[in-house]
Image (cartoon, rainbow, N blue to C red):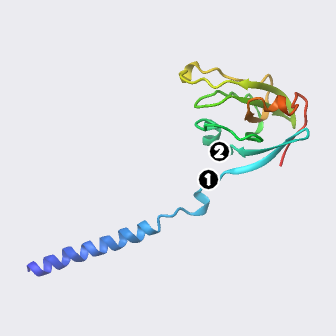
Amino acid sequence: MKKFLILVIVGAAVIFTFFYLKSDSKAVLPIETFDPVVRATVTIGETDIDVEVANTPEKMALGLGGRESLPKGQGMLFPYGQKTPAVFWMKGMMFPIDVIWTSDDKVVQIDADVPNEPGVSDNNLKRYLPNELVDNVLEVPAGFAAEHGIEVGNTVTVH
């Protein structure tokens, strides 16, 4: 009787271990559940900008927050797909940026050298709003717009 009980316990342990290891080795999510980084190029006038596209609500909420810097010539694009009264803040930002607001493939506003606000509570962070509805917002390193002569009225192409 003791041998039988021991065999049952050992057998159960072997079966459990087999299924545990087998399921663990297959613990790879299907490719469609991954959230890959989507990149695009934004051209403003004659200036090309390599951008990461914030293409999910989570990415739009996080933006560039938590990053230490943004390489020169790169940015983040927030495509809304329709005109909206977008509101931005510098939550979690570690560096200043230029915010370029666009509508109907034109720059409609530039908030240059928007400072990060370390130590400021979320409720007290300054909010940045466009003067009109926009369909895209572009964040680039502070000074980028001035350095590249980007102005209100410039044509914007996303490709």
**Circle 1 SS class:** loop
Q: Residue at x 41, y 71 (%)?
A: 22
Would you name the residue on which mark 2 appears?
56
Q: Residue at x 32, y 71 (%)?
A: 17
| Amino acid type assigned to the residue bearing label 1 in the image | Asp
Would you name the residue on which mark 1 appears?
35
**Circle 2 SS class:** loop
Q: Which of 82 and 58 is in front in this view?
A: 58
Q: Is residue 105 left or right of residue 111?
A: right
Q: Do the residues labelled 1 and 2 touch (CB within 8 Å)?
A: yes
Q: Residue at x 30, y 75 (%)?
A: 15
Q: Which residue is drawn at 82% across and 26% down?
A: 109
Quadrant where the N terminus sits is bottom left
| Amino acid type assigned to the residue bearing label 2 in the image | Thr
Q: Is residue 22 left or right of residue 152?
A: left
Q: Within 10 Å of the Cα at label 1, are there few (<14), some (14-19), or many (20+) other Cα atoms?
A: few
Outermost residue to the left = 1
